Amino acid sequence: MYFFLRSRHFCSTFPVRNIEIQSSRSKMFMVMFRCLIVDLYGFCFLNAVHSATLSNNGRIKFALIDWNWIEAITREDLAAAKYWLARQNENSVLDFCPGNHFFRNNRIYPEFFVCPHGLSFLYHKPLHILEVNYRDDWKVRFRVLNYFLSKNSNEPFLFYRSSFGISYPLFSSFVKYLTCDSFDSPNDLSYELFYKFIKILDVLDPISSDFLSEFYYKLYKDGLMNSISVDIINDSENYRLRFFNEKKRRRPFMYFFGVLNDFLDACLIPNISMLSIFKKKNQSIDQCFRYTGEVDRLVLKISACSLDFLMPSLAENAHIFNWLLSVTEISGFYFDNTEFTFNPINFKNVCGFMPPEIPKKSSDPLQTVPSDFIIILNDDNQRRMQYLRFVNVDICFDIFEKLLYKTNISYFEVSYCSVDECHKITELLEQMPELNVFILHGVGIRPDDLDRILFSKIEILVLVGCIFESDSVWISKESPDFVYEIMKNLRTLNVSASKLPMDFMHILLHSFNLENLNISRFEFLPANSSFSPIGLRKNRYSLQLDKYIPNKYLEMFSRTYFANFLSLCDSFIFSDIVFFFNIGDLIDSVKFLDLSDNLFSVEFLTLIDNFKNLKKIKLSASLPSSTVGLPNLGIFETVMALDVSRNDINATNYDFVSKFKGLKSLSLANCKLENKLLKKIMTKDMCANLISLDLSGVDLCFLDFKKIFCCKKLKILYFQISNDHPLSYYCDYLELTSAKLNLNVLKMEIKGGVCFDDLVSLAGFSNLSKVKITCSTFIKTGEENFIRFNPKISNFRLELCLKYYNLDIDTLDILDEMFENCSISIVSPHLS
């Protein structure tokens, strides 16, 4: 395989005008050399792969300072010392002194010492060598050491001066503890060694694995659950502050969350600032704790079910848990009924349309968040709390009333929880003066609740599925020109699927800084006085009116609206929203338009051209079955991103897509595409410009797939393949195109399984940063040939999602070696 990859790379350097000819030549090449590859595989491939480690055989020499050894060093050891530290003068700091040092005429005296830089023997200190068998004896792997081995250097490994002076005795103790070699008893682990061992781990950058978790559990048991626990927690010597810089101070302690008991594991999800604790699953994941420094405010997310597993551990070790929350600076909690079991790769919509993150109401009985969890939090952790989120859980708010006096909550959400009356929640607003985000889903609202909301400083207000009590009446107690506190701060308002008084909504819509408005499927309850949207003429960012319910006030309000993004999805009767296509301010300002899930005719499609500055359009599940008679529209020249996912595309409507000339992003995800139509859709102009292409869920024949080869600028590609050919077959062809250098994000769905060869084929794409492969199972083809396989693939994230998780320990070991310096997660959504 290695020989094949190199040979294919050589051949692909010669330009061939016609990509089909090039593909045919490649296929002939593969056939001609198949037998040759089989014969040469063991010689060319395995030897080439092994050469990366044969020079040092996985052994590493650590060059370390050893003051005890230096003071009692023999002449023989001094003469044999190959590596030295030196300082420029008496006042400078010791640093590595490269080059060959020796004593002339074998006379071991200072005056006969020769330094290649001419420095005196008095300014030198010899380094003590500790040699370890990293590959065979160390089960925990480290990125720093893997990289060091890959360089095939004959030099020893040197810790940088900033690594707080890792000495020979200290590192020897660490190695013994890591390899369980002659570390006499748990009592040998001192309070100082506890922090220093964690520092060494952090310096070497450990790779997530069961072995790393076992090592942290050992530290947890021998340190935090032993007699030195009080010293570690009090940290009178300030080792944590002294050994770790501010940005990395939380990172090495995060791993303890995964060893709190035998039933739970943990991972970091950086893009949403979440630390997730969850029930252990049959999976292999990157816990992603090394990204902790990139997260400002860290929230602990745990399901009510997992919290039941955690509580018995906290009953005895509440002081340890509080210390852990403190050193990792947890600033909030998220309780719900779901498990975040790994850090998924965030694959955005290629056209830039982001789906709303709205929690779904659970049909299962709600589990209780135990009040004892809040009670065990010490004062420091309570005061640090800024974030509280409850989704699909049973909670008692009485316990929070006392707690909120100590906190500065800025985010508070209650969605589909066991709360009979909203006033129990809104009464807490008075105790949260710094609240910026307030979210409620599925609660009944009374007049007092509306008053409390209006007098708050909320910037983001979400009231989804909230119904004002039918037997209640709300009347503002203030004069019509009174400026409520919320009007000075509100920036985002989402009242979708709610029923609220028009008087209340009129006040919110007059907020001075309102930028984002979602008023989908909203019903205005009758007003107690007449209102006009006069004075509402402001520039906004987004306006969402999905499932639009006709309303005169809302129609007048829309005529005063400027918006960058407009969403009119899933309209009950499309003629009800036609007037939006003729509002001067909107058609001049809208750049992103979402018209998904509408029943369009050719006539209605033509109306889109009224928007003069469109850059992105989403028409998911909205194309008519025929676009015959569609005139040439201006949007065909100006639109840069088109999402036509979930449509049936056939010979009578495909031309709507093919007419767009300047597209940089195209989504055909989950379309029913007639055979060989892709070749007609993707015109020469389109292929010349496309950067992002989504073909997820589309059954492609290989002739259609070959059309992708013409996209010379393609950086993001999502596609699905059948069982006709293995994944490597498609990757081999892609590698013959400019995708070899440009492709950055790749997501693939495979109906069958993948094997080692498929993963090896990724090595040909030099610019890959994110890869997700969804398949049924892993096929252990050629397992015996890959035991020592370790390709030099650039550092990228790989997510392998298996419908049936069938990986054994040996296969996992091989995959870990293949991608040892990368972030790899192998998961199965169907198994626990």
Image: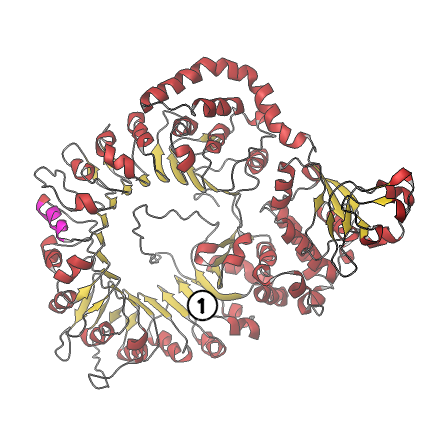
Residue shown at 53%/22% (left/top)?
3
Against 742, is 324 above or below? Answer: below
Q: Nearer the viewer, residue 640 or 239?
A: 640
Query: Which range is magenta?
Result: 603-610
Q: Image quadrant of residue 154?
A: top right
Instruction: Decide if residue 60 is on the left or right side of residue 413.
Output: right
Against 26, is 592 above or below? Answer: below
Residue 312 part of the magenta-drawn span: no
Q: Nearer the viewer, residue 796 or 299?
A: 796
Instruction: Decide if residue 592 is on the left or right side of residue 349.
Output: left
Inspect this view and state whether residue 682 appears: no
Q: Classify mark 1: residues with Cα within 10 Å, few (<14), some (14-19) or many (20+).
A: many
Instruction: Decide if residue 463 is on the left or right side of residue 583.
Output: right
Q: Which residue is disc 1 drawn over?
A: 387
The kind of residue tagged 1 is Tyr
Residue shown at 65%/65% (left/top)?
241
